[in-house]
Image (cartoon, grey):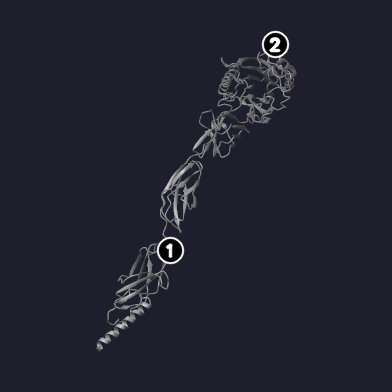
Amino acid sequence: MPDRHRTAARIARVARRAVATLVAVGVVGVVAFATTSPGPALAAPLTLSAAAVSHHSFQVSWAAVDRARAYVVTLATDPDFAHVAFRSGRTTSTSLVASGGWVQEDTTYYARINAVADANVSLPSPALVLRTTWQPPGAAGTPQPTKVDTSGFTVSWKAAPRAEQYRVVVASDRALTKDVQESTTVEPTAQVRVRDGRRYFVKVTPVRKGLTAPQALAQVAVPLKKLGQPGRTFAEPLSSSSLRVAWPAAKNATAYTVQLLRHPGEKARYSTTTPEPSVLIAKLNPAKHGLGAVFYVKVRATRYGKAWSSTRTVAATMLPGSTTHKTSFTAKVSSYNLLKPSKTDAEKRSWERRYAAAARALRGMDIAGLQETPWHKFDGKRPVVQVAKTAKLSVARHPGTKKPCTPNSEPILYRKSRFTVLRCGYDRLDTKGQGAKKWSTWAVLREKSSGRKVLVVNAHLLAYSSSSSTSPRPQAMRVTQARRLEASIARHNRGHYPVIVTGDLNTYPNRASVTPIDVLARGGYASAELVAAKRTGAEFASFHGFAVSRLNGKHLDHVLVDRKSQVLTYEVRHTNVKRAPSDHFQIVTNIAVH
């Protein structure tokens, strides 16, 4: 073999050994070397950086190497590059975007670069370490509220790909800043408990490894719970400027507005709001608010201001307080239903024994209005005369005669040593077709020491119609009778005397939408139980029927006054019902007439 051929073969062997050495130290790729001399060694790339790293791609960049014509990029999943994931061919660019199915999420990759100039290959660069991110979850479907009721709703959505859990945000505004509730769930559904009667916005966000997907808002209107009706209003004057109003709470009410009205149905002249079913109204000047001596109270319940219910309007007043008028006289006034003579009590006593017991309870009274105590004879005796004699009182009669002011069962008794009857009479209160006849008795009395005249009226209104006491018909009939009673008072009081009314009115405030108490209150006559400075036994119902005393404060029996008198005390004279002479308790008041 010629020497020149042997020299060329030797050079080729040296070149092959150089390539083998480069491969051994990690230079990748098949590099075609010329059979010429390699020249000076290339420097290895030094400045490597990563950018745009995501779960499925990333970019590797490096600074250009002097005299390099190309570069080879090797990517591996271990620092020793034993597990090569990608090996590029020669590239003249100084960056490379790695992408494709081989790029895995949340994986650490190692990158190194070799510079190449023809047959000259540099040593590998220092390894660049980077880590791909997690792939975020996919979007869920728009939340769909179902099973919406007053306590909340169920919200469901389409399962989001790759989601590990869902963050549920509920709020009452679109910006999700008010009344916010947050929760997490692994299922594509959630139970939401919220306040009723409000519109809510719902946002569900899929979450994976702290990454989220965008989500649209959904909204749902939660219905309002049904609001109940407040119970019967009780208005109790505590002083000349304070009033306590209480009522049984309305179901699901969140607040109450107490209104004071000049007349029922008119616009409120005064109102106050409270979350509790009672309120103390203090420092009240009725005249300042355009309210009369007798005004009306209504309670309105609400649920979040979106639903309202109201009580019936009841009459009320304030305690008189001090007066600039001097007291003409003070008298003890009683109203007492003695039960018909034909009836017996729980002890089966005769009417004479019962009336004798009742009469003893009337001793010390100055004026008494009796009901169911007739003038006509029973067993040869006049019941009212028997009562008056035992009570040491006199039956009101027409002046100068023995004729009683009424032949019916509503007599007026008085203390003859203190009063003189100036004139008297009686009026029928029922109208045709109302069944039982109902009457009122009236008498103008003059108090001897002061000379002050007063009109005393005693009445008994309808108890029931066709065995019903609470149905609309008897309620309406009582109202008609009360209006006739008011007209009778006006007709017989031309002298504008102070008025005292006694009677069994068979009603109490708020028993119906309009009651005789309301009618008389509008006429300026206030129930003594409302305006008395001191009350005793008022918690007892005035009718007991020889059964256990009812502690409900419902008084069928009344004493009423106008503004020319002041009630000092009011008493429901509670006794043992089994030994009571009547099925009603006696009402006793102490009245200062000005």
Q: Position of residue 99 (x, y in %)?
A: 35, 64
Question: To which residue does mark 2 refer?
Answer: 402
Can you name the residue that lies furthest to the front here?
1
Q: Which mark is residue 106?
A: 1
Q: Quadrant of the C terminus?
A: top right
Residue 526 lies in quadrant: top right
What amino acid is labelled 2 in the image? Lys
Q: Position of residue 65 (x, y in %)?
A: 33, 75
Q: Is disc 2 placed on a helix, strand or loop?
A: loop
Q: Is residue 370 above or below residue 274?
A: above
Q: Quadrant of residue 354?
A: top right
Left or right side of 554 for 11: left
Instruction: Decide if residue 539 is on the left or right side of residue 189.
Output: right
Relative height, residue 72 to residue 428 (above, below)? below
> What is the number of callouts on the image?
2
Label 1 residue SS? loop
Tag nearer the camera, 2 or 1:
1
Q: Residues within 10 Å of mark 2 (few under 14, many from 20)?
A: few
Q: Front-most of 400 and 80? A: 80
Q: Position of residue 176 (x, y in %)?
A: 45, 49
Task: Identify the mark nearer the N-term, 2 or 1.
Answer: 1
Tell me which amino acid carries mark 1: Asp
Vertical relation: 465 (above or below) 59: above
The N terminus lies in quadrant: bottom left
Q: Nearer the viewer, residue 325 or 269?
A: 269
Q: Which mark is residue 507?
A: none
Q: Residue at x 47, y 53 (%)?
A: 167
What is the C-alpha distance between the residues marked 2 and 1?
A: 118 Å
Query: Does residue 313 appear to the left or right of 364 in the view shown?
Result: left
**Rendering coords of residue 592 (x, y %):** 67, 25
Say if residue 502 shows up in the picture.
no
